[in-house]
Amino acid sequence: MLLIADTSPLISLLLIEKLYILEKLFPNYIIPQAVWKELRGHNELNHFTYELSELFKRVKNVKNFFSLSGIDKGETEAIILYKELNAEFLLIDDKRARQTAETMDVKCIGTLSILYKAKQKEEIKKLRPVFLQLLKMKRFYSKQYLNLFLIKTNEKIINTF
C-alpha cells in the first residue's frame, strides 16, 4: 500500500520518536519535495540527523504542479503526488488541506489514526502515554479527539480542563 505523507504528521512522529511506526505500517511511503523542504526548515528537527537522511531517500518530485487555494505547497504537492502515483492514502493532519483533498476523492488518514492502527497491531502498548507526549511536544491535537481514540482502546481519558 502506497501512502504519501505531509509535513505535520512526520514532525509529530519524529518528535515523539515514533516514525518507525509509519515505516512498519506503510514501508513504501513517499514524501514530496516541498514536504522535505519544510522538514529541513523545522528547527526542532535538527537533531534527527539519521531520521532525516532516511526520509530524504523517500523524496519524490511531482510532475505537474498546480496551485490549490488556501493550502501550503507541501500539502498541495502531497495531494498532487497522491493523484499522480495512485496512492492508497494521504497522511495529513491540517483540517483545511484535508477538506481540499477529500473534495478531490483523496483518502486521508491522520497521525492519530496511524497511532491507533499501531496500537491495534501491537506496535505500541498504550495510546495514552503517546498522546500525552504529543501534547507535551506542543503538537496541536484536540483533547476531545484524542479521548475518542482512548475510549476505543479502553484507556483512561485525558483531562480536558
Image: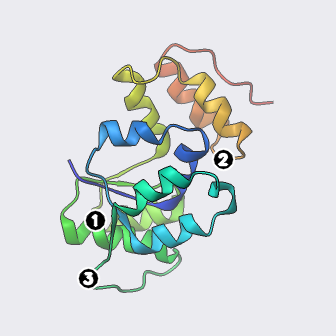
The quarter of the rendered structure image containing the C terminus is: top right
Q: Secondary structure at mark 2?
A: loop
Q: Disc 3 residue type? A: Lys
* Front-lying residue, 97 or 134: 134
Coordinates of residue 32 in the picture (x, y in percent): 38, 69
Q: Disc 2 residue type? A: Arg
Coordinates of residue 94 in the picture (x, y in percent): 53, 59
- The residue beneath circle 2 is 139
Q: Disc 1 residue type? A: Tyr
Q: Secondary structure at mark 1?
A: helix
* Front-lying residue, 24 or 98: 24
- The residue beneath circle 1 is 82
N-term-proximal mark, 2 vs 1: 1
Coordinates of residue 11 in the picture (x, y in percent): 56, 53
N-term-proximal mark, 1 vs 3: 3
Decide: few, some or many residues near mark 3? Use Cα within 10 Å; few <14, some 14-19, many ≥20. Answer: few
- The residue beneath circle 3 is 63
Q: Is residue 121 left or right of residue 75?
A: left
Decide: few, some or many residues near mark 1? Use Cα within 10 Å; few <14, some 14-19, many ≥20. Answer: many
In whole angstroms, how far apart are the C-alphas of marks 2 and 1?
25 Å
From this view, report whether residue 55 is shown above or below residue 110: below
Q: Does the image show residue 10?
A: no
- Are the residues at dot 2 and dot 1 in contact (C-beta closer than 8 Å)? no
